[in-house]
Amino acid sequence: MPSYELALVLRQLPRPELIGVIRRTAEAIFDKGGIIRKFENLGTRALPHKVSEHGVVHREATHFTIAFDTAPTKIADLKEEFGRDIDIIRRHIFKVEDPVEHKCTLHEEMLPPAYRKDVQEIIEIAKRKQKPKYNYNSGLDYYPFQK
Amino acid sequence: MSKLTRFITQNVRVANLLGSRQLLSRSYANAPAVSEEELPTATNSDEPVDMPNPFEKDPQQCILCKHDISPHYKNVKLLSQFQSPYTGRIYGRHITGLCKQKQEDVEKAIMRAQRCLLMPGYHKDLDFLHDPKLFDPERPVRPHKY
């Protein structure tokens, strides 16, 4: 089962009700045969802009993330279920990706264009597209093709 | 006793020989970077020595690669440094001076944070407005593409 992260934006609620919402979402994940790895509370703060969801305008919200594992086929069902919950303003499920080893390519990118590999490839393609041209000083005293 | 003296003289001779060889090899070496193993291949002392360019600079690294930081959508304070305080737009690679991969990661993380309502899209978060500047948008690293 791949790892996912559920980023929730919850309506401003008193603490017991907030716990209820989180319990509800967690149980939905368990019902779909998932396992939960981590809960993370990112706090209550003003939203960057007002958001209208489920017929209510929200200006403040609680951010919460749940890291969980489940089958990829259940993700759409989970999203649909959270979408029906009126206490949830936004829900996004992201796949947790392993960190990839990366070497900085800035040095190659800062080289003059003629030395850059991608530019050299473009020049190569342009050369390939050029049609062979008849050379007029090739020794023949007539033009061999139809004019 | 005589055996011992012979032994000593032999050893001294060997030590002398070694010393003279070292002296010889030093006379060849005009650059400290060249190891002693390469030297005997040059038959003539006037021949140019094959060596890497000693004046070559270290390859440049972008600021995120240098400090080994991978941008994440929950790290809003870092991401907002790549956003314009006037329009909220993400600065391009010619201004940020990041490598291609890191710029792409930053852009992806900012989009993600904005969709999760963690970050504003039309201005910079007021809490981070006076953060230290990583680059000067007035002086781009490269000319822009338009």
Image: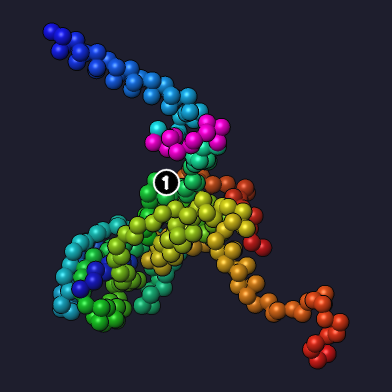
Asked whether residue A68 appears in the rendered view, the answer is: yes
Q: Residues within 10 Å of mark 1 (few under 14, many from 20)?
A: few
Farthest residue to the right: give it: A141
Q: Secondary structure at mark 1?
A: helix
Question: Which amino acid lies under the numbered mark 1 shown in the image of this protein?
Answer: Lys
**Figure quadrant of the C terminus of chain A:** bottom right
Q: Which residue is mark 1?
A: B66
Q: Is residue B3 left or right of residue B142?
A: left
What is the basis of the colouring in this image?
A: rainbow
Which residue appears at 40% of the width and 33% of the height? B36
Give above or below for A141 relative to B73.
below
Relative horizontal placement of residue B60, taking residue A27 as reference (left or right): right
Q: Position of residue B115 (x, y in %)?
A: 41, 68
Q: What is the magenta range?
A: B37-47
Tell me which chain the residue with mark 1 is part of: B
Whether residue B46 appears in magenta in the rendering, the answer is yes
| Residue B125 visible (yes or no) | no
As displayed, is residue A126 above or below residue A117? below
**x, y percentage for residue B85?**
54, 53
| Closer to the camera in the image, A1 or B23 | B23
Vertical arrangement, residue A69 with respect to residue B109, above or below: below
Q: Nearer the viewer, residue A6 or B67?
A: B67
In the rendered image, the quadrant that contains the N terminus of chain A is bottom left
Q: Is residue B2 left or right of residue A120?
A: left
Identify the residue at image location x=18%, y=64%.
A37
Residue found farthest to the left: B1
Q: Residue at x 62, y 54 (%)?
A: A112
Main SS class of the magenta portion in the image: loop
Q: Quadrant of residue A129 in the image?
A: bottom right
Residue found at x 52% / y 33%: B44
* Labels in figure, total: 1
